[in-house]
Amino acid sequence: MLQRRYLTSHVETECPCYKVGCQYCHITGGNQFIQGEHKNHVETECPYRKVDCQYYHITGEHQFIEGEHKEQCPKLPISCLNKCGVGSLPRKEMEAHRKVCPVQCEYHNVGCEERMMRKDLEFHKKEKMEKHLSLTSSQLTAVMMALHPIWSLNLMTGKTVVKSDDQVCPVILCIADIHEEKSILCSYSAFYSHDKGYKMCLRVYPAGNGSGKDTHLSAYLYLMKGPHDDELTWSLRGKFEVKLLNQISDCEHHSWTMNYDDSTTDVPAGRITGGDIGRGWGRPQFISNEDLHKVTLTCQYLKDNCIFFQVSKL
C-alpha cells in the first residue's frame, strides 16, 4: 500500500514524463505537457494566462492585455508625435497636451524649422507658401541629382530652377543657348547664402573676361543689396563653391572655392551701400574653352547648348 501511495505521489509530482494539462488553455481543446515543460508554459508562454496591466488596474488574458487593451490603455506612456521634448505622457493626457504643444511645420523635412501652436499651423502654411515651394523645389533638385544626373539636368532647364529669387544655397543654375561670342551671358535672379541670408548672384562670361578673354569661360560671384542686410553681420564670411556640372555622370565636376575671411581684405564682401550690386569676385580663367567643349565617355559640360552651375555654401 505504501509503495502504491509513493508511486502515485511520484507520478503526479516528480515524474518528468508525467503529462498534465494547462489550466488556462484547456478550454481550447487542451494541451498536454510533461511536468518539466508545464511550469514554463503556464508562466511565460500560454496566451490565455492571467496577467495584470502594469499601468492600469485591470487583469485579463495575456493576449488581450498585450493586444487590444495595450492599444487603448489610458495610462500607457506614449511619446508626443510632435517630438517636442516633453518625453512620455499617459495616453489619456496626450490629447490635452497636443492642444498646447508647439508643432513642427509640415515642411520641416525640406528645411522649414519653424514651430507654432497647432491653431496657427494653417496660417503659417498660407503665409509661407512661396518659401515652402522654394524649399521643396531645392530639395527635389538635390534628390534628383543624386538619383540620376542626366535626368535631373534635363529637367532643370525649366523656370523653377533658374528664375526663383527665393532660392537658398545650394542652388543649381542653368545657362541655356550659350554662345561664346557674347561678352556677358546673364546676371541671374538672386539666391541667398542661407535662409534670410546674404543676397548673391552669379555672372558668367562665355567669351571670357580679363585674363580669360577669348580663351576661357569666366565666372564671378556678386553680393547684392538684400532684404535681410540690417540683421546680418558684415562683412560676409564663409566658403562658397562654384561648380560647373558634368551632365552625363556624377563625377569630374569642375569647381573653385572662394573663402571670404579676414585674410582676403581686398575681396568685395562688405555691405552694398550704392546701387543694388557690388563688385564681383571670381575666376576670369574659370575653365578653358577646350575643356568646356570636351566630350568623353564620362564627362560633358556643354550639352544641348546648355551648361549648369551649382553654388553651395560649405
Image (cartoon, rainbow, N blue to C red):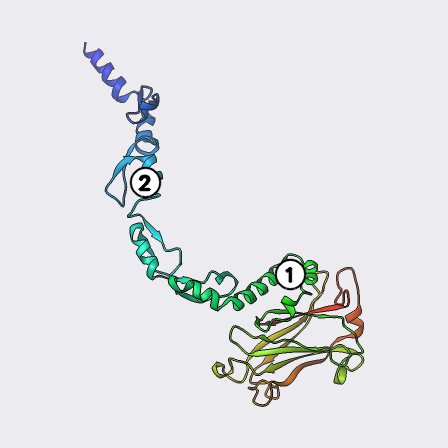
Q: Which mark is residue 145?
A: 1
Q: Which residue is mark 2?
A: 69
Number of dots carrying numbers: 2
The image quarter containing residue 185 is bottom right
Residue 288 image point, x, y percent: 77, 75
Q: Which mark is residue 20?
A: none
Residue 121 image point, x, y percent: 42, 63
Check disc 1 and give the amino acid type.
Met
Q: Left or right of 53: which side holds 105?
A: right
- Residue extending farthest to the bottom is 274
Callout 1 crowding tier (Cα within 10 Å): few <14, some 14–19, many ≥20: some
| 148 up-or-down from 112: above or below | above
The image quarter containing residue 139 is bottom right
Question: Which element is circle 2 on?
Answer: helix
Q: Left or right of 79: which side holds 4?
A: left
| 46 up-or-down from 161: above or below | above
Identify which residue, 27 or 155, lies in the foreground.
155
Q: Tell me which residue sits at (54%, 73%) in the image.
A: 194
